[in-house]
């Protein structure tokens, strides 16, 4: 391996043409170097375990891409550039070490490329991507044809890196995370803020400041610095000719009278007490105003007139993942931000607050175990401006876990700090569910973190598109919720969430929902009172319709006929009958379900079943068309009504008989008495099994000695053998395991194949 000092790297990179190989070329920083080297005319190859849209684009520009790291693919390279994420035992790196090939780090290559131009380095802990993009944009609009290198995709700049042979300047975002800031020898630098960060690399703040001090010392022209940041001011103020910027009265370039309007900031700029004019920045947040003043200072000193600067700032759009709006509607706003340090989180949450939305809901993914451990206390205090916070587990970014440190560490700190709306969701892929279920009209949702939490926001955005269409169908009176826990809507109190929970209030809305689901190929499931339902822990994907309220809860009496909507409780039908002096429906008192479920299951009690009282049923078919069928046209079985397997009941007419009130009361009391004495009061789904011909299931389970047997918090009731009760906190998995256990004992000992009466639906967790 050759030491870099032995080669004239700036000449090699900007004055000659070579074969250069980049290890880890798909990384956001490395792909920028590859782009610059290609534009400089080099023959560039690169290797990475993953390919990205960026590597695809670079391949079209001439990059030879290798999807693995093999020494032979880089054997003809004159120079090797490697990312700091690459391990020391990488085969290409090892082979270069054995040969005489020069090997350089990413920042060394960048610093050398910059030597071919007049360098401008933007440095600081927070905001440097936006600020360097803003600088490159303003210089470009000012006609200076700058080259640039920015650590993220910047739509307004076209690419994250570009070499422009026409211009003199090179604007680069300097990365302080690994000490390589000391590689740069720029003409100017702009320093935004300095504080404790990257404590996996630095011992303390003193070590960080040392690197910044070296950068300042190596800057040949002007140091521009944020005077509002104490550490930065302390380090830069003594530098000869340094130019300060910020909100501070005494700043050389100062912003004042900042007015935040939703997503824009309007402010006045003064230079050494003299007004320069008004600027508008279409990027929200006070901190961005501060950064913009730094850019204004630099651009002004480079000779660009203020009007030109102001005009380009007005056009500026910021980087991806920097308060990036992912979804916006009248009701919701979804924003993604890269903030992963407590200071950045506070700032971004302040910006979110300033938009004036009703609530700010946050999903946060801590980045790196080392940062989580070092700054846990600061993280605990960073979320005061969020109404709700869902913290997921740590994004390791190539770090090994630290025992005792997880996302829960931060959730606990936030709670200890006194925040009442924090929860921990260790499964990243479920974060959008938790936040989705909290959503209410007027909310802003923010995803925060440097890992892959933004993907959860995108998933939520995709679901919201559908949820908003569903809401339009059910109208103001209806309700739509995302990821509604079905444990709240089943009598057994277990089950994962419904992806889209929809409550229509009338038949038209229900019919339109059926048609919509069909058009969009979305699964549709109808749930009533959930009294005969066991939903698996993964919940139900698609639309879960719960017809209730409005027309669906209506009960009307016409002579001896009672018409009831599917949302009405069977018990209420029995009592409506009693009030009108109509009997024969008293058995319905004993069924916990609604009319819809009673019909679907042909539910029964006290020797009666739904079908025996039915006159006709009104239902919607798979196309949302309404039909009415009389009872004698229908096929009905024990606990099954096939018509309603693919059609959806909306109401039913039951026949009752004029009966003396005392008789009705007596029957109702008998039903109550039967329930009280033979059935458990605990949470259950009624009878779990259909009664086999040979023997009632309850008696069978009893005789098999299985009462009180349990799995987790699921237990066979001691009162009735055909009831499984939830002792509190049972999962569907517990329930299903216990059901299987009972079935296998019944099979082994009595040769009876028990069949579940309870409907088992949904996906496993
Ligand atoms: N039995 C036992 N041990 C038990 C439970 C029951 O020996 O642990 C005996 C009873 O003594 C009785 C026979 O088994 O001789 C049947 O029991 P029960 O009268 O309680 O009726 P079931 O068939 O278990 C049915 C319905 C219930 C309804 C009751 C009362 C089915 C599957 N179940 O229960 O409906 O409430 O009659 O009318 O048809 C439901 O379907 O979810 C439900 C609760």
Image: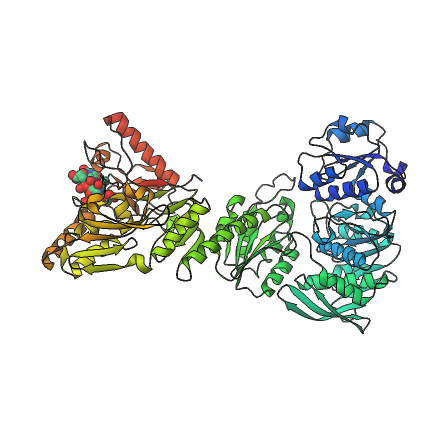
Based on the displayed image, in which of its 4 quarters is residue 337 positioned?
bottom right
Query: Residue 597 appears at what percent x and percent y?
Result: 29, 47
Picture layout, residue 192 above or below residue 251:
above
Based on the displayed image, in which of its 4 quarters is residue 563 positioned?
bottom left
Q: Nearer the viewer, residue 567 or 342?
A: 567
Task: Say whether residue 498 is visible.
Answer: no
Q: Nearer the viewer, residue 547 or 561?
A: 561
Query: Residue 253 appears at what percent x and percent y?
Result: 79, 67
Q: Which of 134 and 185 is in front in this view?
A: 134
Left or right placement of residue 453 versus residue 252 in this view: left
Q: How is the image coloured?
A: rainbow
Task: Say whether residue 555 is visible.
Answer: yes
Query: Residue 732 appears at what percent x and percent y?
Result: 38, 41
Left or right placement of residue 497 versus residue 279 in this view: left
Query: Residue 34 appears at what percent x and percent y?
Result: 77, 40
Q: Which of 272 and 550 is in front in this view?
A: 550
**Ligand number 1: quarter of image:** top left
> Which quarter of the image is occupied by the C terminus?
top left
> Which quarter of the image is occupied by the N terminus?
top right
Based on the displayed image, in which of its 4 quarters is residue 250 positioned?
bottom right
Determine the residue located farthest toward the bottom in the rendered image.
274
Q: Which residue is drawn at 40% across and 46% down?
A: 524
Q: Residue at x 71, y 51 (%)?
A: 154
Label total for image: 0
């Amino acid at each position: 391996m050759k030491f870099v000092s032995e080669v004239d790297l700036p000449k090699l990179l900007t004055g000659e043409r070579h074969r250069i190989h980049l290890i880890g070329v798909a990384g956001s920083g490395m792909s920028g170097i590859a782009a610059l080297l290609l534009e400089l005319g080099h023959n560039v190859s690169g290797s990475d375990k993953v390919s990205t849209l960026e590597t695809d684009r670079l391949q079209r520009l001439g990059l030879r891409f290798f999807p693995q790291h093999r020494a032979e693919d880089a054997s003809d390279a004159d120079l090797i550039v490697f990312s700091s994420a690459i391990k020391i035992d990488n085969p290409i790196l090892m082979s270069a070490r054995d040969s005489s090939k020069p090997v350089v780090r990413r920042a060394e290559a960048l610093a050398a490329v910059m030597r071919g131009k007049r360098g401008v380095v933007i440095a600081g802990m927070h905001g440097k991507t936006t600020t360097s993009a803003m600088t490159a944009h303003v210089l470009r609009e000012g006609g200076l044809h700058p080259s640039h290198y920015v650590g993220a995709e910047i739509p307004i700049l076209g690419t994250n890196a570009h070499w422009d042979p026409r211009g003199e300047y090179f604007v680069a975002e300097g990365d302080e995370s690994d000490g390589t800031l000391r590689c740069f020898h720029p003409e100017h630098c702009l320093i935004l803020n300095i504080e404790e960060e990257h404590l996996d690399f630095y011992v303390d703040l003193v070590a960080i400041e040392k690197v910044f001090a070296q950068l300042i010392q190596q800057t040949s022209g002007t140091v521009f610095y944020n005077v509002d940041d104490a550490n930065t001011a302390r380090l830069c103020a003594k530098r000869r000719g340094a130019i300060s910027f910020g909100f501070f009265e005494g700043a050389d370039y100062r912003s004042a009278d900042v007015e935040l309007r939703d997503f824009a900031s309007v402010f006045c700029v003064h230079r050494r007490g003299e007004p320069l004019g008004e600027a508008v920045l279409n990027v929200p947040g006070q901190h961005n105003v501060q950064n913009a003043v730094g850019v204004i200072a630099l651009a002004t000193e480079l000779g660009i007139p203020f009007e030109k600067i102001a005009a380009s700032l007005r056009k500026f759009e910021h980087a991806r993942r920097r308060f990036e709006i992912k979804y916006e509607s009248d009701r919701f706003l979804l924003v993604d931000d890269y903030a992963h340090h407590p200071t950045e989180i506070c700032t971004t949450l302040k910006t979110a607050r300033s938009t004036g939305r009703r609530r700010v809901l946050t999903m946060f993914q801590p980045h790196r175990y080392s940062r989580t451990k070092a700054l846990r206390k600061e993280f605990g205090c960073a979320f005061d401006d969020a109404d709700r916070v869902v913290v997921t587990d740590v994004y390791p970014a190539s770090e090994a876990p630290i025992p005792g440190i997880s996302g829960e560490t931060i959730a606990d700190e936030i709670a200890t700090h006194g925040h009442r709306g924090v929860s921990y969701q260790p499964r990243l892929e479920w974060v959008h569910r938790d936040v989705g279920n909290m959503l209410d009209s007027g909310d802003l949702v923010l995803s925060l973190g440097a890992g892959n939490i933004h993907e959860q926001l995108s998933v939520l955005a995709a679901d919201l598109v559908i949820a908003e269409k569903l809401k339009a169908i059910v109208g103001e009176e209806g309700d739509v919720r995302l990821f509604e826990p079905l444990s709240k809507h089943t009598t057994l109190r277990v089950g994962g969430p419904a992806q889209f929970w929809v409550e229509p209030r009338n038949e038209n809305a229900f019919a339109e929902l059926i048609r919509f689901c069909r058009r969009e190929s979305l699964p549709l499931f109808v749930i009533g009172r959930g009294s005969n339902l066991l939903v698996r822990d993964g919940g139900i994907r698609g639309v879960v319709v719960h017809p209730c309220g409005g027309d669906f809860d209506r009960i009307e009496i016409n002579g001896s006929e009672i018409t009831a909507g599917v949302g009405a409780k069977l018990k209420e039908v029995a009592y409506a009958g009693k009030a009108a002096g109509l009997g024969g429906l008293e058995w319905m008192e004993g069924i916990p379900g609604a009319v819809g479920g009673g019909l679907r299951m042909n539910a029964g009690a006290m020797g009666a079943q739904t079908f025996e009282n039915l006159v006709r049923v009104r239902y919607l078919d798979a196309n949302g068309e309404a039909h009415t069928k009389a009872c004698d046209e229908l096929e009905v079985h024990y606990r099954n009504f096939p018509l309603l397997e693919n059609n959806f009941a909306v109401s039913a007419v039951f026949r009752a008989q004029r009966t003396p009130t005392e008789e009705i009361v007596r029957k109702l009391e008998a039903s109550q008495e039967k329930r009280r004495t033979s059935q458990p009061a605990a949470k259950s789904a009624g009878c779990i099994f259909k009664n086999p011909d040979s023997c009632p299931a309850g008696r069978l389970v009893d005789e098999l000695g299985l009462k009180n047997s349990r799995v987790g918090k699921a237990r066979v009731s001691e009162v009735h053998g055909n009831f499984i009760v939830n002792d509190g906190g049972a999962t569907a998995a517990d329930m299903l395991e216990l059901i299987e256990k009972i079935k296998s004992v019944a099979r082994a000992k009595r040769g009876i194949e028990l069949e579940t009466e309870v409907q088992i639906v949904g996906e496993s967790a």
